[in-house]
Amino acid sequence: MTASSLWFDHALLAQGWARGVRLTLADGRIAGIDTDVARGSEPAYGAAIPGLCNLHSHAFQRGMAGMAEVAGPEGDNFWTWREAMYLFVDRLTPDDNRAIAELAFAEMLEAGFTRVGEFHYLHNDLDGRPYADPAEMAQGIVAAAEATGIALTLLPVFYAHATFGGAPPKPGQRRFIHDVDGFARLLDASRAAVSGLPDAVVGAAPHSLRAVTPEELAAVAALTDGPLHIHAAEQEKEVEDCLAWSGARPVEWLLDNASVGARWCLVHATHMTPDETQRLAASGAVAGLCPVTEANLGDGVFPTQAYLRAGGALGVGTDSNVLIDAAAELRGVEYAQRLVHRARNVAAPAPGRSTGATLFNAALAGGAQALGAEAGLKVGAPADLVALDLDHPSLAGRAGDALLNAWIFACRESPVTAVWRRGRQVVEAGRHVARDAIVAGYRRTLARITA
Amino acid sequence: MTASSLWFDHALLAQGWARGVRLTLADGRIAGIDTDVARGSEPAYGAAIPGLCNLHSHAFQRGMAGMAEVAGPEGDNFWTWREAMYLFVDRLTPDDNRAIAELAFAEMLEAGFTRVGEFHYLHNDLDGRPYADPAEMAQGIVAAAEATGIALTLLPVFYAHATFGGAPPKPGQRRFIHDVDGFARLLDASRAAVSGLPDAVVGAAPHSLRAVTPEELAAVAALTDGPLHIHAAEQEKEVEDCLAWSGARPVEWLLDNASVGARWCLVHATHMTPDETQRLAASGAVAGLCPVTEANLGDGVFPTQAYLRAGGALGVGTDSNVLIDAAAELRGVEYAQRLVHRARNVAAPAPGRSTGATLFNAALAGGAQALGAEAGLKVGAPADLVALDLDHPSLAGRAGDALLNAWIFACRESPVTAVWRRGRQVVEAGRHVARDAIVAGYRRTLARITA
């Protein structure tokens, strides 16, 4: 159902919180905003907040969520998890990829994300050969975005090498691999694939300094004017290997050699020196934090306090999709800081400021920048809205920024009751409108893969 | 509704996982267990697991969940949070206390906890005088347990001093304070208060080494044969102050001076040396971990890996109740270890072992020990059951311990659909059977307090 107007008790507008807010919608955008008005005959909800951008997802990994929480033969870490992920990749057909992405994207909408940045590296067939359509697997991502209604920033991944110095790829990586010419064809095919989506964005993602040479990085960046995303400094071993290869750390190398600026998103950037932290903050790039996955994979803790004090931009992503929850990502950013600094309200910049609102607003702006999208509720902006239920006990008696604190820090059961994308309601009573069919398709895929 | 028999696709019995399980119930206990049987006419559910014990709760703090996530005037930490908590305490009537506890206990049941250890320190009236019934406030806890159906281990708190060395209490602590004789009367009144609950346990809780002198600690421990709980080493300042007072650290002091053994629960025990960790593990006491609250309050990270390797017993608690979620507590124990050790599956003791099941089984046994209760599904045990929904997408294709991993690590939306206490169903379709009335009462209380 596409709404023409909606009324909210509270709304977080671009200029701040307002009460008694009527949003008039037209052509998927906010055509008018009235505040301090009584409820009329239009549908009424609790508190409207803008949908967040999920700036880093590997949708297919949703299908292995929880499967790797078993001890392996020789001690577990990020790299042993990666081997388990490669085995999962070995079984995924294009249909599986689409079915899993549909579930992941539906869950993202239910969690309060209205756009996903899909860092998409699963390109080739089961034998490692390109499909007839090089964007065959990307078509599944596009189809899942269309089926669920989530906005898509597609980030086709360039992946060519097993590690620093241009090492040849491993067999488990065969589905990811391109040369630059092949990647240029993939980008063209990806742009064609999204042409039916009204507000899709296509960028590019050189996977990591492990997987691309400096020459390839420059060539890939030159192929797009859109967002550029790269994994950087997620693991200490990666930092050590980068130092051995170049004498510089990954973030340092990128800042020195890759014209890192506003269209860049450095995903994770976990392991930085204080100097790297200051320089990244000053670069205008977005740090893409994925605290749920970074905890699950044992990555480490991003220096959020120093980075925010230096004015750095950040956003959040669900990455491995082991648990898809916008509130948990924002909470995770703060809680890791509290454990490191043995302090509270670390992200809040000044007395009286709300930690939850600080993180929400940072992730709203940084996520939108990283995905080439607009942020915030204002006239002319996309009607990408999330409604929080004021009847949720954790929101009882709360208003303004306290609503964000309640949602982010104090809810087991989600208060997200309704979500609209371009004015169309895609979540009702906390559930995606197509959830039953999407879950059925997902269960069929999982039954096949795990048989 | 009290069931006479229930059927489950899977059940985690005391001896391990079984399929096709019929539980016959009588007088609130499991009277019979049949496995590998087809579903008959009895109600059928997905996977049965035993309810966990929530070994550490301050129920009333649920009412301030999310309120303290705003920066104060001079930097925030545990101690500034405590001042905010004292201000909240200043407003709570007995009715408020009961209404908030009802919500907290209902949410605990919805989250998979079937018994709560209420570390209850709010005893005196708003002016700091004893109520006519010294257990007036405890009556509210008992009433909330009765209204919700949760099993109660009531831990009346002895609190006499502001800090080490017998310092007089502060005005904000006036509602907590007793001398030993007054506490003995409180214990008697508390035992009378729970007499109507079929399986309540009463222990005692000397609050912390800050709040009790060595003489008082010994006197309080002598007043009960039940569980003894104490906060220990939650904060670094507490460790420093304890060293200044006694030359020993809090856990060290307790191990040296307090006959710490199987009926003891040391809550938090966050800041320990390797030697303290080994000694606590060998003592037979339970470490009471509250990772959600410990992150929220910036406490620090318990040395779980070393403690488990030394054979230590642990359980989990929701403490401040800022977010009530059994899965999040178990996940939090593991994720903090992963961030510290930069490794995965840290809790799992050997190759092939499940991290989620390791933590679940440890918390099941340790929580029951700490609360003076029975643990596990076997003939004769209380019918305290939690059903996980196999239709939840995160549980698709999972069996056995993988169900626990899916629940603990991979679910935003809870798969807990049904909960029984002593055979009576208290949670249906994920919601407490009295939720609407309980939430209405809670909202009235919050409206009054925040007016």
Image (cartoon, coloured by chain):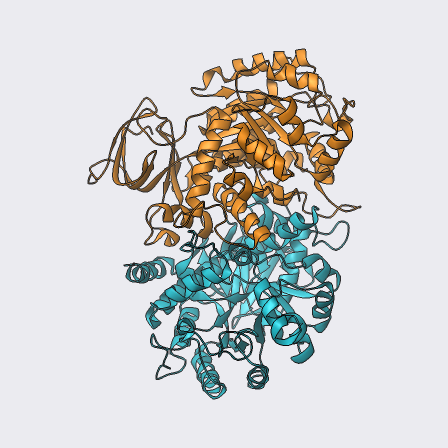
Chain colours: A cyan, B orange
In the figure, residue B134 lies in which quadrant? top right
Q: Is residue A125 visible?
A: yes
Residue at the spot 55% in from the left edge and 58% down from the top edge: A294
Q: Please say if B172 is above or below A68.
A: above
Residue B49 lies, in percent from the top left, at 37, 38
Q: Is residue B40 left or right of residue A137?
A: left
| Image quadrant where one finds the C terminus of chain A | bottom left
In the figure, residue B219 lies in which quadrant? top right
Residue at the spot 59% in from the left edge and 36% down from the top edge: B277
Front-most of residues B255 and A21:
B255
| Image quadrant where one finds the N terminus of chain A | bottom left
Q: Please say if A300 is above or below A158.
A: above
Q: Is residue B163 visible?
A: no
Q: Residue furthest bottom?
A: A181
Residue at the spot 53% in from the left edge and 31% down from the top edge: B282
Front-most of residues A427 and B246:
B246
Front-most of residues A350 and B208:
B208
Residue B8 lies, in percent from the top left, at 28, 40
Q: Please say if B140 is above or below A363.
A: above
